[in-house]
Amino acid sequence: MPARPEYAIDRQPCVPVRFPDGHQEILGLRDVVLRAHEIEDLALPLPPAASGVLRTLTAVAARVTGLDDPEMTAGEWTAHRRALLQNPQGFDSRRVHDYFDSYIWDLFHPERPFLQDPRLAVQCQRRAGTNALVFGRPAGNNLAWLSAHSDMNPVPVPCAQALWHLMAQHFYGAAGTCSKRTVDGHSSIMGKAGPLRSTVSFHPLGRTLYESLLAGVPKFNGDWHDAEDLCPWEEPELPDPLGPLPPVTWPGRLLTGRSRHAILLVPTPDGQAVADAYLTWASQQPKLPATDPFLIHDIAAPKEKTAPRRLIPRRADADRAVWRDLDALLLAGDESAACMRPAAFHTLNDLPPDLRATLRVRVHGFDQDRETSNRTWYTALTPPIWPWAQEHDAAKAQRIAQCRAAAEEIGTLLAAKAAEAWRETITPPTTTTRPSRKTPKRLCSWTLQASAAYWPRAETTFWRLIEEPDVPARRAFANDAAAALREVTRPAIVQFRQAAPAVTRAVAALFREPGRRRRAA
């Protein structure tokens, strides 16, 4: 009898990592944790998968270090983490081996495949296929824009890559129609979106992966004393698809246990690749409230005066540079703040000074809509920014916030004035008819081109201005906006008689102070 396919991700090479000297290796999950003090950073080419793997590794780090102990006082927790950070040998190897030996990490285990549900082979009528599993591949009747894959000839996915997309689906998977799943007579073809869908994550990045994981462990906030905290692979039983969702406990379920998708990978006979997959809903229950510790949350006014403020995760936007979120990371915030920095950042001031001075931020974003469409993913890395935090340099933090706000104000004004100038050019106002101030339903070409030309200029100006606190920020960004508008409208000025006066008025409006604009209006 042939041996069943097996792919244990704790031992099989499946996670690319980069070392300080620049070379890369692919390691199993167990070796990633054991050698975390030697590794500089993950090198996963799929940002949504990297985001999921980081959350998984952070949960494992909390388990093997005891930082998941809710009985610790705040002072004890901080002192314990600082002591761990002083250990040059990284995580305790005995505790790491004990932890990984306690659970099943096999992608193709017959009873408890890692982050999968083996019951789907019976509960689902049809398989979804590898193209539905892999982000970027066309599935069903979708056109092949970026890859030449087809459901008529599905290509198996190497196991390591299948793991990446398994992670990405659990965290960023789509809502809407999925494979039909029938459980105890209840059938549905509608799934719900993953907990991180359309969001951008911010992860503290130390000098080594060991420092990054310890810096990223969120602090216990005092809730869930009576509920047992378990990651999905730690659960004694498979979840009940029709039952109530388990509470969002700290840190395991908060980081790894909020998926809305059920998945089952079907291996090739040799177990070296995934030939097919089931992809469907995991629960029909409404999601439970949770504040992910690696997301910036914008604060919305409550619908009712007595209701608490609503926290809305900041959406990923591939057109939005990371520097435009710096102030949200650096400002501590108060009751009047418009946003809240990631909860994992609340304890960074307790880190040793030498680590704080070098701490950067790794950014992983997936630009998606709320339901099914995926635009693109991206990753970015900030310089060491924590010395600029409000707690350490209040003046620099406020200057960064001031410059960012001025850049946003001018960027919004540029978009409006470019559209207004475009309307005046194509439909010049008469002496008796004032130009319409309504925003067009679609952005005109001048708005798109001017914004595209403005923001790279604004980024250069931003970094210069934070070192020049006496230079007026608004006027500096207005200069960038005016240069961008003149650049993109230069061909039209030659072609259309009305363009030059319209652009001149738009440029003048960019330099007009807000109070003067209101009086003029």
Image (cartoon, rainbow, N blue to C red):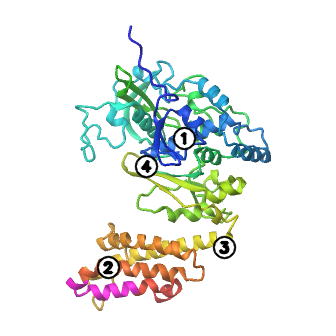
Secondary structure of the residue carrying tag 1 is: loop
Mark 2 near mark 3, Cβ–Cβ under 8 Å? no
Q: Which residue is at the front of the view, 170 or 27?
A: 27
- Residue at the image position 32 percent from the left and 85 percent from the top: 502
Q: Residues within 10 Å of mark 3 (few under 14, many from 20)?
A: some
**Residue 419 against residue 511 in the figure, above or below:** above
3D distance between C-alphas at marks 4 and 1: 14 Å
Question: Is residue 436 at least partly visible in the picture?
Answer: no
| 1 or 3: tag closer to the N-terminus | 1
Task: Indicate the quadrant containing the N terminus: top left, top right, bottom left or bottom right.
Answer: top left
Q: Amino acid at mark 4?
A: Arg
Q: Amino acid at mark 1?
A: Lys
Secondary structure of the residue carrying tag 2 is: helix
Task: Indicate the quadrant containing the C terminus: top left, top right, bottom left or bottom right.
Answer: bottom left
| 4 or 2: tag closer to the N-terminus | 4
Image disc number at residue 487: 2
Left or right, 489 with respect to 211, comes to left
| 4 or 1: tag closer to the N-terminus | 1
Disc 1 designates what residue? 287
Q: Which residue is at the front of the view, 89 or 83?
A: 89
Q: Amino acid at mark 3?
A: Ala
3D distance between C-alphas at marks 2 and 3: 35 Å
